[in-house]
Image: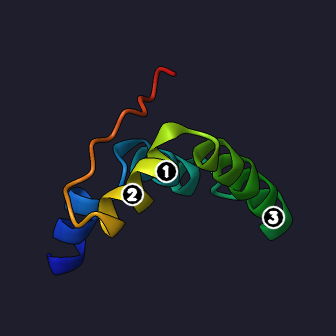
Amino acid sequence: MEIARDIARNTAPLSVALSKQLLWDTWGYSPEEIERLETDLHHRLMAGPDAREGVLAYLEKRPPVWRGRLDD
């Protein structure tokens, strides 16, 4: 429960949603296919506003304000 609370408080909702989707959608994929999909998602997330916000919030010791949405 401690890990779940940490994820809920400190991880961008879009990042969590895409990670869960990757886990569910890749059943039966090869490790190479999963790696490619994971890298694509990583690039997408790191190009978004929440990547910067997460770092800034941590450095400024404040709660993050997430802006990424699944429908973006």
Q: In the image, residue 21 lies at what x, y percent? A: 51, 46
What is the distance, in whole Å, between disc 1 and disc 3 at their CAs? 32 Å
Picture coordinates of residue 53 (x, y %)?
41, 49
Q: Secondary structure at mark 3?
A: loop
- In the image: residue 38, left or right of residue 24: right
Q: Amino acid at mark 2?
A: Leu
The residue located at (34%, 45%) in the rendering is 13
Assess disc 1: are there few (<14), some (14-19) or many (≥20) residues with their C-alpha within 10 Å of its C-alpha.
few
Give the quadrant of the N terminus. bottom left
C-alpha gap between disc 2 and disc 3: 36 Å
In depth, the one of 21 and 52 nearer the eye is 52
Instruction: Classify mark 2: residues with Cα within 10 Å, few (<14), some (14-19) or many (20+).
Output: some
User: How many residues crowd around disc 3 within 10 Å: few (fewer than 14), some, or many (20 or more)?
Assistant: few
Horizontal relation, residue 57 to residue 50: left or right:
left
Q: How is the image coloured?
A: rainbow
Asked if the residue under mark 1 is in contact with the one under mark 2, i.e. CB atoms within 8 Å, the reply is: yes
Q: Is residue 29 visible?
A: no
Circle 1: residue type: Arg
Q: Position of residue 71 (x, y in %)?
A: 47, 20
| Corner quadrant of residue 54 | bottom left
Residue corresponding to mark 1: 52
Q: Which residue is mark 2?
A: 56
